[in-house]
Image (cartoon, rainbow, N blue to C red):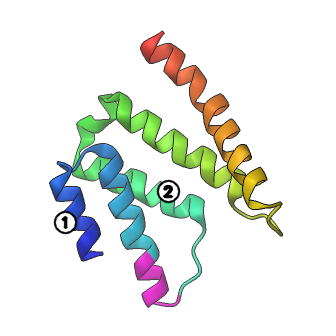
């Protein structure tokens, strides 16, 4: 966790690095406390924490793209009974993020 916070400091605590550090800290605390947490709950807590840390981050494009991309990845891979193979999983994630982010990319960047 210390290395992640150090790296986030080097990266300037941008919204994606804040989200990453917060989610990593939540996941590591759950491991330390031996708790089973759901990925969407972790993402929601990270969203609230980022907004508490920097309320104006909601105005940045990176905020929306970062959280939507992670949401799409979690939606595709979380809660599955078994893996369908590494290559197929990678293709699913790539397809989901491409299709899922395309409306925002069109809106922000035309």
Label 2 element class: helix
Q: Is 56 placed left or right of 69 in the picture?
A: left
Q: Is residue 19 rendered to the left or right of residue 106?
A: left
Quarter-of-image position of residue 25:
bottom left
- The residue lying at 73 percent from left, 45 percent from top is 92
Q: Are marks 1 and 2 in contact (CB under 8 Å)?
A: no
Instruction: Please give the name of the residue rendered at 53% of the width and 42% of the height, measured from the top-left corner.
Output: 69
Q: Where is residue 65 in the image (x, y as percent from the top left)?
A: 46, 35
Q: In this view, does 59 lie above or below 8?
A: above
Mark 1 falls on what kind of element? Answer: helix
x 40%, y 57%: residue: 46
Chain-order first, disc 1 or disc 2:
1
Residue 6 numbered mark, or none: 1
Magenta-drawn stretch, dominant element (helix, strand or loop): helix
Residue 59 is marked as: none
> Circle 2 sits on which residue?
43
Residue 87 coordinates in the image, percent (x, y): 74, 53
Q: How many labels does the image show?
A: 2
- In the displayed structure, does residue 57 sit left or right of residue 85? left
Residue 31 located within the stretch drawn in magenta: yes
Residue density around tag 2, few if under 14, some if 14–19, many if 20 or more, within 10 Å:
many
Nearest the viewer among 83 and 87 is 87
Residue 58, x across and y down, in percent: 33, 34
Residue 90, compared with residue 106, is above or below; it is below
Query: What are the residue bounds of the magenta stretch?
Result: 28-34
How far, Cα to Cα, is label 1 from label 2?
21 Å
């Amino acid at each position: 966790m210390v290395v992640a916070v150090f790296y986030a400091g080097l990266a300037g605590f941008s919204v994606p690095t804040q989200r990453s550090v917060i989610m990593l800290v939540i996941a590591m605390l759950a491991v330390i406390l031996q708790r089973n947490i759901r990925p969407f709950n972790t993402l929601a807590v990270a969203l609230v924490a980022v907004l508490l840390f920097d309320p104006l981050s909601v105005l940045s494009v990176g905020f929306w793209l970062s959280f939507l991309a992670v949401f799409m990845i979690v939606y595709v891979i979380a809660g599955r009974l078994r893996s369908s193979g590494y290559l197929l999983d990678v293709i699913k994630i790539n397809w989901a993020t491409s299709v899922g982010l395309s409306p925002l990319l069109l809106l922000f960047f035309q």
